[in-house]
Image: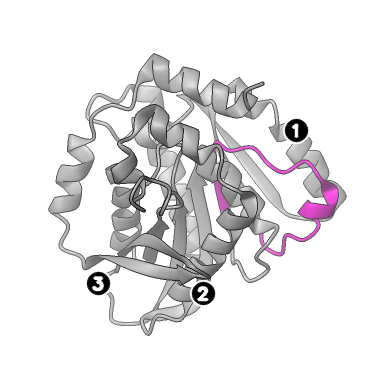
Amino acid sequence: MKNPILLALTLWVSAFGLSAQDWAKARLEKSPRHLEWVKVKQGTRDVSAFVAYPEVKDKASAVIVIHEIFGLTDWVRGVADQLAEAGFIAIAPDLLSGAAPGGGGTAELGGGDAVRKVIGSLPPEQITADLNAVADYVTKLPACTGVVSVGGFCWGGAQTFRYATHNPKLKGAFVFYGTGPDLPAELAKIACPVYGFYGGKDERVNATIATSTDLMKRVGKTYDPVIYDGAGHGFMRAGEAPDANEPNQKARTEAWKRWLTLLRK
């Protein structure tokens, strides 16, 4: 039987498509900031990651950006660049690194079903180890204060919530329309606040918010979910597109402002 979450995401992609990201790529290419690709060692693995640096005079805190089910796309790299524009070092790892024939990642898989098939088979332990290696890498950068948060979208939102149960050094976890772990013993390991961002028209995910709220309260952890009325699943991407509808655009604007405010606390 197919994983129900991956099945629902596949249906969403079929209905709305992963539209051309020319607008995201164009914005990225015009960025005045220093952007680079790095290889992060994780055991015998090389995790490819995209790093965006802010133009600031002092050291900056860092944000790990976890990609959607589509892999490390131009849009995700654009999010990293926009975080750098706001004053943070952002690092977006390709968690599909080494999964393509010949050892490539998202780009070599070519998108679509190939990416979704592979991402659904990634071992959770490998994802955690990759993210730990990335966190270690970015916190040791000379330009970094050593403070790191994590945020992710859709599949990456769920991974963000899960990763918070494995890294007690995180300053904050920002879950964009992702589901949470359902084991109290795991949630009890979380050492940072978890903030949720959800679209009002995303009941598949929103149906899990009450459970996450109850479980996090039960183990004495901070969980602050906000639902943006009228927005659909994936509103952070959809709300940024040139053809964005008003609810998604409004939700994206409000959620982005909230995210930056929380990161600066």
Q: Amino acid at mark 2?
A: Asp
Q: Position of residue 84 (x, y in %)?
A: 32, 62
Secondary structure found at label 2:
helix
Distance from disc 1 to disc 2, alpha carbons, whole Å, reads: 33 Å
Distance from disc 1 to disc 3, alpha carbons, whole Å, reads: 40 Å
User: Closer to the camera, 80 or 68?
Assistant: 68
Q: Nearer the viewer, mark 3 or mark 2?
A: 2
**From the viewer's perspective, is residue 75 above or below residue 142?**
above
User: Closer to the camera, 105 or 253?
Assistant: 105
Left or right of 214? Residue 235 is: left
Q: Amino acid at mark 1?
A: Ala
Q: Position of residue 4 (x, y in %)?
A: 63, 24
Left or right of 264? Residue 18 is: left
Q: Position of residue 86 (x, y in %)?
A: 33, 61
Q: How many marks?
A: 3
Q: Amino acid at mark 3?
A: Glu
Residue at x 31% of width, y 51% of height: 77
Q: Residues in magenta?
A: 174-193
Please name the residue that numbered disc 3 is placed on. 55
Distance from disc 3 to disc 2, alpha carbons, whole Å, reads: 22 Å
Please name the residue that numbered disc 2 is placed on. 136
Q: Main secondary structure of the magenta part?
A: loop
Please name the residue that numbered disc 1 is placed on. 210
Q: Position of residue 141 (x, y in %)?
A: 40, 80
Secondary structure found at label 1:
helix
Q: Quarter-wise, where is residue 31 in the image? A: bottom left
The answer to whether one can see residue 109 in this image is yes
